[in-house]
């Protein structure tokens, strides 16, 4: 019954005539089984954190079972209020929104220049963008932090927003997508009197909703889980994000069960985001590697 949906397929990895072969069916079943096992292994830590959060401190330290004796949300509510998690959720959302806007606008503008405008020397700039992908981000963190302090931007979200506005990977994704857009529409817009910026805002961006959605998902996930730069810039400012406060909790007198619940709170937004938009995420990763 599982293979009936492939009967009318004429393209793709598995086609209608493929599933008529017992050998192909057996291979597919083995692949599904292996993927299921890996999926369970990957999801087990998240489920362990969630179920452990329902336990009290005594049960958590003495019982080795996965499932708690009682499913009660009172512990989560108590930890949420005790650690004042609403403040750090708000701080994280402020940082994430700014990062998303910067990632779309600034990286999109650079990709627009490289893919559509193509000024003199654009190949050199494109080469530098690709070359920068080879450099680990942590190697420049010291110079970045020193310059942030010199500009007086510490204890501010602005450096975090701008860091996502200069992401070579996002530039590559935008560039590959822009190069596949119909050139006729762009030329028609120029003939109608649109200037360079108007072409970008009125023509390019409306036609680029799929890749914009992918960039938004990537930047939200990356910004939410980022720790090092927010820790260096925001620590002690009252604007700490969720990930920064998790580190503070780990070095304080917070109980183990409160720490487990705090970790669970921190993984809720990216988990929901990935669950809802996993197809766009995988399609976007493939689009960055293969020009469509």
Image: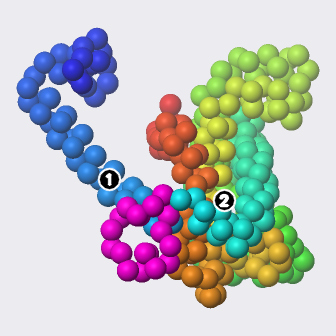
Residues 172 and 149: in front is 149
Rendered location of residue 102, percent (x, y) = 77, 51
- Name the element at disc 2: helix
Question: Magenta segment, which residues?
Answer: 54-71
The tag earlier along the polypeptide, 1 or 2, is 1
76 in the magenta segment: no
- Relative to 59, does residue 180 appear above or below in the rendering? above
Whether residue 53 sits left or right of residue 179 in the image: it is: left
Marker disc for residue 244: none
Mark 1: give few (<14), some (14-19) or many (20+) Cα within 10 Å: few
How are the residues colored? rainbow
Which secondary structure class fits the magenta region best? loop
Marker disc for residue 223: 2
Marker disc for residue 40: 1
Residue 207 seen by the camera? yes
What residue occupies the far left of the structure in this picture? Answer: 22
Q: Quadrant of residue 234?
A: bottom right
Q: CA distance from mark 1 to mark 2?
A: 26 Å
């Amino acid at each position: 019954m599982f293979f009936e949906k492939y009967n009318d397929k004429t393209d793709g990895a598995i086609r209608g005539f493929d599933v008529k072969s017992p050998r192909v069916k057996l291979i597919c079943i083995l692949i599904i089984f292996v993927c299921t096992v890996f999926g369970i292994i990957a999801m087990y830590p998240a489920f362990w954190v969630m179920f452990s959060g329902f336990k009290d401190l005594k049960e958590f330290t003495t019982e080795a079972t996965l499932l708690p004796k009682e499913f009660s949300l009172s512990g989560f509510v108590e930890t949420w209020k005790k650690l004042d998690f609403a403040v750090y959720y708000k701080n994280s959302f402020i940082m994430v929104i700014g990062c998303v806007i910067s990632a779309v606008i600034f990286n999109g503008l650079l990709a627009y220049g490289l893919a559509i405008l193509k000024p003199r020397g654009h190949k050199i700039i494109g080469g530098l963008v690709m070359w920068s992908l080879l450099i680990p981000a942590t190697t420049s963190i010291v110079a970045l932090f020193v310059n942030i302090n010199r500009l007086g931007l510490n204890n501010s979200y602005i450096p975090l927003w701008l860091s996502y506005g200069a992401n070579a990977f996002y530039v590559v994704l935008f560039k590959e997508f822009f190069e596949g857009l119909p050139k006729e529409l762009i030329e028609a817009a120029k003939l109608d009197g649109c200037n360079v910026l108007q072409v970008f805002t009125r023509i390019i961006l409306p036609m680029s909703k799929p890749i914009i959605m992918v960039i938004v998902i990537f930047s939200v996930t990356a910004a939410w889980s980022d720790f090092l730069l927010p820790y260096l810039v925001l620590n002690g400012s009252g604007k700490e994000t969720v990930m920064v406060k998790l580190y503070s909790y780990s070095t304080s007198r917070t109980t183990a069960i409160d720490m487990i619940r705090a970790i669970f709170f921190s993984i809720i937004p990216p988990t929901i985001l990935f669950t809802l938009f996993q197809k766009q995420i995988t399609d976007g990763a493939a689009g960055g590697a293969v020009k469509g």
